[in-house]
Amino acid sequence: MKKRVEKSSKEKVDKVDSVTDEEPPKTAVNEGKCFVVSLTLDDYQCSGNLELDFTELCKLMAVKEIPSVKIKRSASTNGGVMGWKVDEVLLQVLSRLLPSLSNLQCLHMWRMGLTDHTFNSMRNTVSLCSNLRKVVLEGNPLPEQSYHLLIGEDSMLTDLSLRNNHIGEEGARLIGSALSTVHSANKNLLSLNLAFNSFGDAGAIHIAQGLRLNRSLLCLSLSYNQIGDNGAAHLAEVLGPFALSHEEIVERRKLLIKGEESTMVQPSLVSLADSHERPVSVRSSSSLDRLSKSTKNSTKKKENPKKRGKTSGRSGSKERGAKDNKVPRSQAGKSAGKDNNLVVSEQEVVETVNPLLDPGIVHTGGKVINPGNTCLTSLNLSGNKLTEQSLKAFLSSLEGQGEGGLLRLSLNRNQFPSDCDTYLKIQEMMSLRDPLKKNCSGRVEDEHSEPKTTSEA
């Protein structure tokens, strides 16, 4: 009898060991009932359904109170995380869930109680979302104010809102440096909302510094930030022609020398006498012209033999792909008609242009003058401390802008009378620029007047 009992007990132990060797079962609690979970967080395959996947992943992580999530029904998928605290466990769930949403384009995060550590984890998750372009991170003050990490050089975000985050001078300095320095610049961000923070004049100066060499940002809101005339004057300065600093001039010369060294591969394209007789700061525009012309000519010489000879199927497909690329007529011209292989896409042109090598740069009075940031189209400075003194600086910069420039400038709720002459002039100038107030003939019509009709063909 003892032998039989020992034998049966050994068989039970062996069965248990075999089960644990294969895969240990896990238990989780759901409404007071126990059930076996066969998957781990890494094993779970997301289906792309936000509500379903979020609930299942929370169950796998034994989250007791699962927050409700909803998708805003629109042409693109929008995820919202609002009003509930995100701890380490929920961060693991989101890091598994969000990158799986291929249609996720906009993410709202409001009052999540983020810390510097959890923010860095969330930032890494955001970078893994291939189609995410808009992030709204509001009501999340961070001690280290590291919001600038969302707009680094490798960031693909085009729209970022950082309202009501108690961003101070240091945070504004970091954001300004992320927008641009003499060595780097963000090339994807189109809209930045910094309203309802508190960085004041000092922060506005840092933001203005970031706008000097940034040529991607279109819309910027700095409303309700306690900005006075000093900060506003620096913002106005970068909108119109401004003198390059010593550091910017040094970097400009390095770029010019580097561009000329690339042309030295073919000495006949650059005159050595010309390069030695004139200083670097004066020959910038001519060297750029020669560089662009020589590049086009050398490209034609290399491409023409291929055109004469027989092309394989693979090269033929490349030619057909090149033909499909749309190129403005001003860039292509007649040369594109003669040689279809010579095609330059608009994206490539934008990526190679550096504001320090802007063709509009001039030398006058011993200074190197940049034409200014004419890419910014909308600037909101409402609810600050501007007086008529800073309005004069904006009016001067607006008058100095050439093609492009601001189309909308919001200055209401500041410390100047609404009927002062300078403000009225700015309003008139903005109304002439605003495309929404122009009719087809280019005239500006009053809101209450009837549209004018003409009998001209």
Image (tube, rainbow, N blue to C red):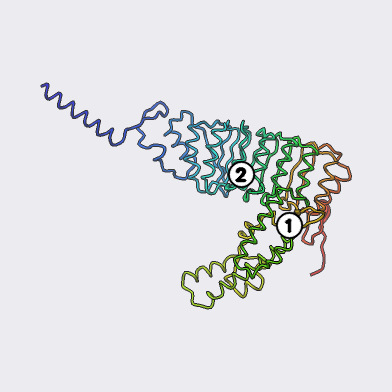
- Amino acid type of the residue that numbered disc 1 sits on in the rendered structure: Ser
State the image coordinates of residue 160 (x, y, percent, origin top left): 63, 43
Question: Vertically, is 306 above or below 128?
Answer: below
Q: Residue at point 60% right, 45% down?
A: 152
Could you tell me which secondary element the residue under label 2 belongs to? Answer: helix
**Front position in the image: 278 or 387:** 278
Task: Please state if 61 lies on the left or on the right of 110 as rendered.
Answer: left
Number of numbered discs visible in the structure rendering: 2
Query: Callout 1 environment at 10 Å: few (<14), some (14 to 19), or many (20+)?
Result: some
The Cα–Cα distance between marks 1 and 2, rounded to whole angstroms, is: 32 Å
Q: Residue at point 47% right, 36% down?
A: 92
Kindly check if marks 1 and 2 are in contact, taking CB atoms under 8 A apart as contact.
Answer: no
- Amino acid type of the residue that numbered disc 2 sits on in the rendered structure: Ile
Q: Quadrant of the N terminus?
A: top left
Query: Which quarter of the picture shows residue 258?
Result: bottom right
Q: Quadrant of the C terminus?
A: bottom right
Query: Which quarter of the picture shows residue 277?
Result: bottom right
Numbered label attached to residue 281: 1
Q: Which residue has dot 2 on it?
A: 151
State the image coordinates of residue 101 (x, y, percent, origin top left): 50, 45
State the image coordinates of residue 17 (x, y, percent, origin top left): 25, 31
Of callouts 1 and 2, the N-terminal one? 2
Could you tell me which secondary element the residue under label 1 belongs to? Answer: loop
State the image coordinates of residue 236 (x, y, percent, origin top left): 78, 46
Numbered label attached to residue 190: none
Viewer-nearest of discs 1 and 2: 1
